[in-house]
Image: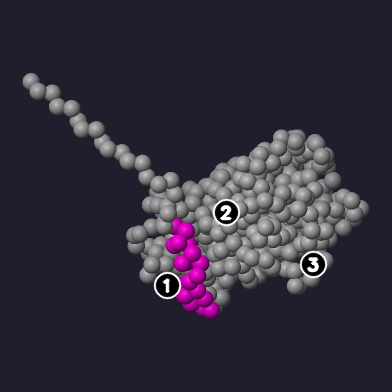
Amino acid sequence: MTRHTASPVLVLPRPRDDAALPGRLARSAAATEGEDLRGEDIPGWLADRRRAHRFEVERIPFTRLDAWSFDPGTGDLGHRSGRFFTVRGLRARVGGPSAAEWEQPVIEQPEVGILGILAKEFGGVLHFLMQAKMEPGNPNLLQLSPTVQATRSNYTRVHRGAPVRYLEHFLRPERVVADTLQSEHGSWFYRKANRNLIVETDGAVEPHEDFRWLTLGQIHALLRQDNLVNMDSRTVLSCLPVPAPAQEALHSDTELLSWITGERSRHDVAAELIPLSGVRGWVREETRIRHEHERYFDVVAVAVRAGNREVTSWTQPLFAPRGLGVTAFLTRLIGGVPHYLAHAKVEGGFLDTVELGPTVQCGPGNVAHLPPERRPRFLDTVLSAGPERIRYRAVHSEEGGRFLDAESRYLVVEATEDEAPLVPPEGFRWVTAGQLTWLVRHAHYINVQARTLLACLYAMDTGEEPSC
């Protein structure tokens, strides 16, 4: 009897990166006319979608919340299903050079959501499927959203609403362009992360009136305008593996990683959830939970009606920050290469103590009472900058599903050696946009505000690293 053995399967290694992708992204960034819309027609399409659906958001007392209630024992504000999210208390202690201790309300949402943008090539140009989506906390209600923007509770239909459109492309991706787990606002969420996905398809995609295929160049143009591209779109777009024209930097990648590791090591952060009713310095009233000195944010309740959502009406809590925030990178040319001053930012809700944030990230009204030496470094430099030194400026709102009218001025401001020296203060480091893009491919290195600014850096110069 002759025994036959199976021939071994020949497995060949392949390139670790898609060599064609940088050129495809560059072509898309240079294209201002898309498959679905011309650039000048996009605001009109968004306006049409606003008119096509009924959107209403009303502030209500907590007693009018449906399916939400305060736990009689802990005071925590949660949904009767035990899903979605819960407003709890947080106690944080920071040791080391920035020692502090505080308590506050915080959002606990342990489930990982999907923020996904679907990509497809039309006429040799890569396009991205963007959604005109209403969120109750958006100042103008409807903004440009990713293809899919859903918590696990949403896409598993805990709310018994309609299925999430195009979700199948992200649960079973055809070709992955970018995929990384990223944090959300560490000052308002407790260890919250979302999966940021960009996937490409060659197949047919059923059209829908609330979605349009846009080029990267068209999206970049919208990023230069106020409150058009929502936070979830910005964080996903920051994960695009955009090539950096300049390979040089003041610090090598290894030196940068070592510095971040050192910053994480030297900050001792202890954060724990506590009952909301026991949070010191905060007062619960009929229509809000507020800080005793009227600072930081309020916790409020809203009733929502939205004609084009999976569920057309609901109530929920929202965090309502006080005043317009300021989020800025200082920038300098170093050896002919644009660099940006990053801050090793400690926030109570981070999973890993420190993430790289912008040079300045604060609500000026929340620190106005502090003496100069305790105010955020470089805040005055940013606030006093004349228009000739501002390389990027736009007002963007934060995540409208959890925050009400949470807006910040996002800025890139040119600085001098006297204002921002080559050897910066402890906790700051000069980095290039290419280094930020490299780091954002990994989880929990770049915070959500810095990711917005990273997406905007490339929008400054049609897909390439900006020059100052």
Q: Say what amino acid the circle numbered 2 marks.
A: Gln
Of the residues tagged 2 and 3, which is closer to the observer? Answer: 2
The colour scheme of the drawn protein is one colour
Find out whether residue 123 is within the magenta segment. Answer: no
Q: Position of residue 80 (x, y in %)?
A: 61, 45
Q: Which range is magenta? A: 21-41
The residue positioned 83% from the left and 58% from the top of the image is 418
Identify the mark at residue 385; answer none if there is no mark. 3
The residue positioned 76% from the left and 72% from the top of the image is 387
The residue positioned 55% from the left and 68% from the top of the image is 462
First in sequence: mark 3 or mark 1?
1
Q: Position of residue 322 (x, y in %)?
A: 78, 59
Q: Position of residue 247 (x, y in %)?
A: 57, 54
User: Can residue 439 be seen here?
Assistant: yes
In the figure, 209 relative to 231: above or below?
Answer: below
Identify the mark at residue 35; answer none if there is no mark. 1
Would you call the spot at circle 2 few (<14 residues within 10 Å), some (14-19), or many (20 or more)?
A: few
Would you call the spot at circle 1 few (<14 residues within 10 Å), some (14-19), or many (20 or more)?
A: some
Q: Residue furthest left?
A: 1
In the figure, 213 relative to 283: above or below?
Answer: below
Q: Position of residue 367 (x, y in %)?
A: 85, 55
Left-right relation of 458 to 165 = right
Q: Nearer the viewer, residue 334 or 23?
A: 334
Residue indicated by mark 2: 247
Task: Tell me the CA gap for discs 2 and 3.
Answer: 29 Å
Identify the mark at residue 71; answer none if there is no mark. none
